[in-house]
Image (spheres, rainbow, N blue to C red):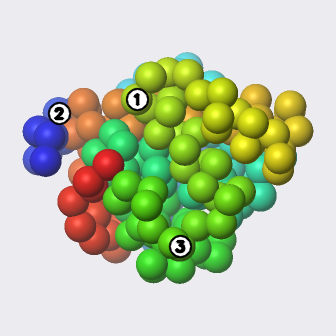
């Protein structure tokens, strides 16, 4: 597997002021601390505020149904070898209806019979973007069978957002939060 830091390169904040507390209030875990990604991003409050806007839109206000959104995000996490991204979204994906078999299949080449044509198009879109930064004509035609233009825009930008997030998580050495699973197996895509 590709090298990743085994510990924080940037440590999460330990204290907050009133403004920062407001930015972090929706990111708190059971122990009252922010999830590690947000604890580190809190070292740049202005960026965290904008990050929360786009990330919150994708997760809570977007047009893409949650199951399909999680297929896309998990596949990006697998491509980027981001333990944190894949682990967090494994938990979310389960809540959104993805089976363990589907989650593990997102770590492997698409040859599996787990996916129908529409899901396969989403996976191929992520693969195309992660390998060549462009959705192939073949994948685009298949996407158009299930998604309108606005939805395809959101899907492509979701891939871009989570590639950026995964690169940050990997580079900053963000450690898994307690209770977040690691990869069930090494990605082979």
- In this rendered view, identify the residue nearer to me: 107 or 139: 139
Among the 4 quarters of the image, the one containing residue 164: top left
Q: Quadrant of residue 167?
A: top left
Q: Residues within 10 Å of mark 2 (few under 14, many from 20)?
A: some
Whichever of callouts 2 and 1 sits on the residue coming sooner in the sequence is: 2
The label number, if any, that marks residue 49 in the structure image: none
Callout 2: SS: loop
Circle 1 residues within 10 Å: few <14, some 14–19, many ≥20: few
Where is residue 142? Give x, y as percent.
73, 44
- Is the residue 130 above or below the residue 186 in the image? above
Q: Is residue 143 left or right of residue 45?
A: right
* Residue 20 appears anywhere in the view: no
Residue bearing the label numbered 3: 114
Which residue is disc 1 drawn over? 131
Residue 186 occupies quadrant = bottom left
User: Which residue is located at x 55 percent, y 49 percent?
Assistant: 123
- In space, the residues marked 2 and 1 are separated at their CA atoms by 27 Å
Pointer 3 local density, CA inside 10 Å: few below 14, some 14–19, many at least 20: few
Identify the residue shown where x is 64% and y is 49%. 121
Which sits earlier in the primary sequence, circle 1 or circle 3? Answer: 3
The circle on residue 9 is 2
When the figure is inspected, residue 98 is found, relative to residue 38, above or below; the finding is below
Rounded to the nearest angstrom, the CA distance separating label 3 from label 2 is 38 Å
- Tell me the SS state at disc 1: helix
Residue 16 higher or lower than 68, as above or below: above
| Disc 2 versus disc 1: nearer the observer | 1
Residue at position x 24%, y 30% from top?
A: 171
Could you tell me residue 139's position as x and y percent?
A: 64, 38
């Amino acid at each position: 597997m590709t090298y990743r830091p085994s510990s924080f390169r940037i440590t999460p904040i330990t204290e907050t002021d009133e403004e920062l507390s407001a930015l972090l209030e929706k990111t708190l875990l059971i122990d009252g601390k922010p999830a590690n990604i947000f604890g580190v991003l809190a070292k740049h409050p202005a960026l965290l505020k904008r990050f929360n806007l786009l990330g919150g839109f994708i997760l809570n206000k977007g047009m893409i149904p949650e199951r399909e959104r999680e297929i896309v995000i998990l596949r990006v996490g697998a491509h980027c070898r981001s333990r944190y991204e894949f682990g967090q979204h494994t938990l979310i994906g389960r809540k959104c209806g993805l089976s363990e078999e589907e989650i593990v299949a997102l770590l492997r080449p698409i040859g599996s019979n787990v996916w129908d044509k529409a899901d396969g198009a989403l996976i191929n879109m992520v693969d195309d973007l992660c390998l060549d930064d462009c959705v192939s004509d073949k994948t685009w035609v298949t996407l158009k069978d299930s998604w309108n233009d606005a939805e395809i825009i959101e899907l492509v930008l979701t891939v871009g957002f989570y590639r950026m997030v995964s690169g940050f998580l990997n580079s900053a050495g963000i450690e898994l939060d307690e209770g977040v699973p690691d990869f069930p197996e090494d990605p082979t895509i």
